[in-house]
Amino acid sequence: MQFNYVAEDAQKKRKKGSIEADSKPHAMQLLMKDGLFPVSIVDVLQDEREKNENIFTRDISFVSIYNKKISKKKLLTFANQMAIMVKAGVSLTTAMDVLTTEESDKSLKKILEHIRADLHLGVHLSDAMKKFKAFPEIVISMVEAGETDGRLEVFRLAIGRLSLKLPVIGKLQKRVYAARFCEVLSSMSLAGIDITQGFLVTANTIKNAYIYKILMQNMDDIRLGSSISAAVSKNNAFDKLLLSMIHTGEESGMLPETLGKMAELYEEQTNESIKAINALLEPLMTVLIAGIVGVVVISMVLPMFGMYDLF
């Protein structure tokens, strides 16, 4: 299928063109993969059909829009497009602006315009959607659950940051995540995957919410043309050694190999730390088990001495 698009690059400059894709979501993915953020995407054939329609058949009653039913296929397309954009780091309001602008279905477009207006007023997406019968209750419930997750995000960030400051465990976590970061990004680079896409995949392998958020901020800088070393040096997610080695790898043109070596180094350090922790815990566990056994034995013996006292 042929689509005409209007998109913005990293410098917010608008570009127009056409692209071959299987669907609108597919077209969005292709554009975003090239570093472009879609503003509008129009099916060429559908656009031509609409131009030939009688203008009166395209008008929708403002009053009836609240009871308007939308096909499941159209709702699914809308949900997929929204998910793609939000996952790529686009804000909810911006994503709604884009989807409203490019929506070709007049009924759904009118609904999205009302929802967009509510979002700009600070209304929750689920509350805005509840006004329209077009959205099934199950869809609204899922959106509400997602919003609850968003409110819990602040808590997860605090826990993630606190866990990195814990004695012993915090340092061990940093090494584990540094090893994973190096290993995955090295593999992505060796496979010839675009650096922005590779960095996104790498960030998604990090389970600590605090480090993940930092890496997503770094990715924004990389999209704007920053080097990886310059981007990650703005925070303390990784130690200075790794930052220095990333810079060296970029300068020498051997970043994948350098990251691979660093992954091996961090894995060795992690294994050594785990062995040290186990060595420390073994005598403590022995003392703890001995204490438990002692308590059990004493609890069994004392009643026997009490019986002897009766005689």
Image: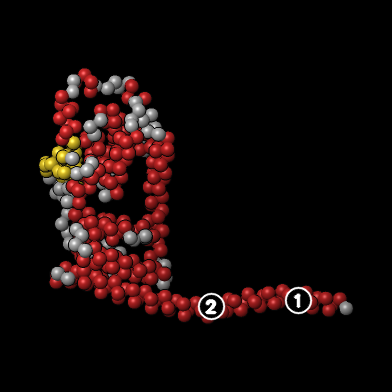
Instruction: Describe residue 9's horizontal placement relative to residue 284 as left or right.
Output: left
- Quarter of the image for residue 13 reads top left
- Give the label on residue 276, or none: none
Screen quadrant of the C terminus: bottom right
To which quarter of the image does residue 185 belong?
bottom left
Q: Which quarter of the picture shows residue 193?
A: bottom left
Please tell me which residue is depicted at 34% across the width and 34% down the height of the picture.
72
Above or below, 137 relative to 266: above
Does residue 252 appear in the picture of this structure? yes
Q: Vertically, is 19 above or below 218?
A: above
Secondary structure category for the residue under label 1: helix
Mark number, residue 302: 1
Q: Residue at x 22, y 35 (%)?
A: 101
Foreground: 4 or 176? 4
**Amino acid residing under circle 2:** Leu
Check the picture and name the quadrant holding the N terminus.
top left
Q: Amino acid at mark 1?
A: Leu
Report x, y in % for residue 106.
25, 28
State left or right for residue 129 relative to residue 54. Answer: right
**Which residue does the numbered mark 2 point to in the structure image?**
284
Question: Where is residue 275 shown, x and y percent of the image?
Answer: 42, 78
Q: Considering the numbered disc 2 on the image, is that residue within a helix, a strand or a loop?
A: helix
* Residue shown at 22% from the left, 54% from the top: 220
Q: Earlier in the sequence, mark 1 or mark 2?
A: 2
The residue under the point 64% across, 77% down is 293
Tell me residue 277's x, y (percent).
44, 76
C-alpha distance separating marks 1 and 2:
27 Å
Name the outermost residue toward the top.
Answer: 56
Q: Is residue 130 above or below residue 164?
A: above
* Up/down of 27 relative to 51, above or below: below
